[in-house]
Image (tube, rainbow, N blue to C red):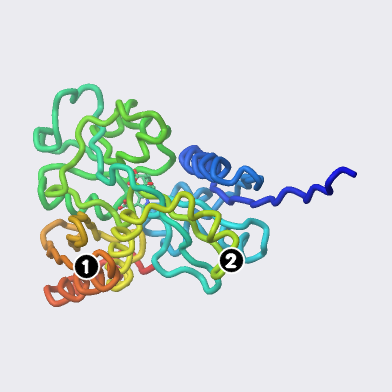
Amino acid sequence: MSPVSSPTRVIRIGSRKSQLALVQTYWVQEQLQKAHPDIHFEVHTMSTHGDKVLDVALAKIGDKGLFTKELEVGMLNQEIDFAVHSLKDLPTRLPEGLMLGAVSERENPADALVLHEKHAGKQIDTLPEGAVIGTSSLRRLAQLRHHFPHLSFKDVRGNLNTRLAKLDAGEYDALILAVAGLERLGMADRVHQVLPSEISLHAVGQGALGIECRSGDSEVLSVIRAIEHLPTTRRCLAERAFLRSLEGGCQVPIGVNTVLEGDSLILTGVVASLDGKTVVKDQVSGPAEDPETLGNTLAARLREQGAQEILNSIFQEVGRA
Ligand code: DPM
């Protein structure tokens, strides 16, 4: 008698439809498929609100789950089992019933300067007076204005290819984009300069992927453990606690940097006003085992130095998400 074969277990992965989201999701699918040959991993794509509203400045449409909400509803409805996000797009407070289940190894978390060809050979500090920098990140805007008040800034939306086409067409002199996104799309050659952390502290979670799943879904949690990277998780949990404690959404002029040194973690954070004139920056270090305490401690320190006033005036200006 032939043995009765059990039906193959299917796990459904949710993803946004953008090229970057799909590259990231297929990478996760491939890693998990290798680690769990007995399970079949299927990718289901969905459009999120952030993908549909392309003509409004990011900071104005609010950010609460802008790129995650439809996927979250899909998880709660059991249509998908988990979702792959750029961790920096995943809000620090998740809906009831969902959790951050795993974080993958971080790639270069820094920001990159991408120049129009007429500026070839230049760097951020040698761009001419009035050069137009395309970014819709308040974090990049505030930090760069602080260091380079002679540059001007213009909003830019759309996917990476759309943005690069606008740059090449001469609408901007330069763009600031995440190194990790360009690398994942095979466009690392567009990076003219990796901005040092003294100039631009990166966004919370930048360069890492976050897997969001149903709280307590023990099967999914044990499956996704295959891509978990503990050092990255610790760094990102400290960064996320810092942002959560400051009540900052995705679109705030808040930057971070984390360094692991043996058993200790060093966390640097900045909050800057949109005109770049007021910058509050500090650093804390402590046991890497307790990253969230570190994030909360740094937030409290920056608040003592005026960070809350900076944030409150921005929430008044651009609205709160
Ligand atoms: C968030 C921001 C941006 C994205 C804000 C910030 C950049 C928006 C812009 C929260 N999400 O960074 O301060 O510059 O107009 C995004 C990118 C990636 C994930 C693209 C990028 C790829 C890198 C990664 C958009 N989300 O930052 O250039 O996975 O970390």
User: Which residue: 49% across, 38% down?
Assistant: 23
Tell me which residue sits at (63%, 47%) in the image. 44
Towards the viewer: 157 or 98:
98
Q: Is residue 233 visible?
A: yes
Q: Position of residue 151 (x, y in %)?
A: 15, 42
Q: Position of residue 150 (x, y in %)?
A: 10, 43
Picture quadrant where residue 293 is located:
bottom left
Q: Is residue 47 left or right of residue 303?
A: right
Q: Nearer the viewer, residue 221 or 71?
A: 221
Which residue is label 2 attached to? 217
Question: Do the numbered discs 2 and 1 sit on residues whose CB atoms are within 8 Å?
Answer: no
Q: Residue at x 33, y 50 (%)?
A: 206
Q: Along the polypeptide, which appears first: circle 2 or circle 1?
A: 2
Q: In the displayed structure, would residue 180 be above or below residue 289?
A: above
Q: Is residue 161 above or below residue 25?
A: above
Q: Position of residue 158 (x, y in %)?
A: 43, 41
Label ID, residue 95: none
| Closest to the observer, 283 or 265 | 265
Task: Identify which amino acid the numbered label 1 is placed on.
Answer: Pro
Q: Total marks drawn?
A: 2
Q: What SS does tag 1 mark?
A: strand
Q: Which mark is residue 287?
A: 1
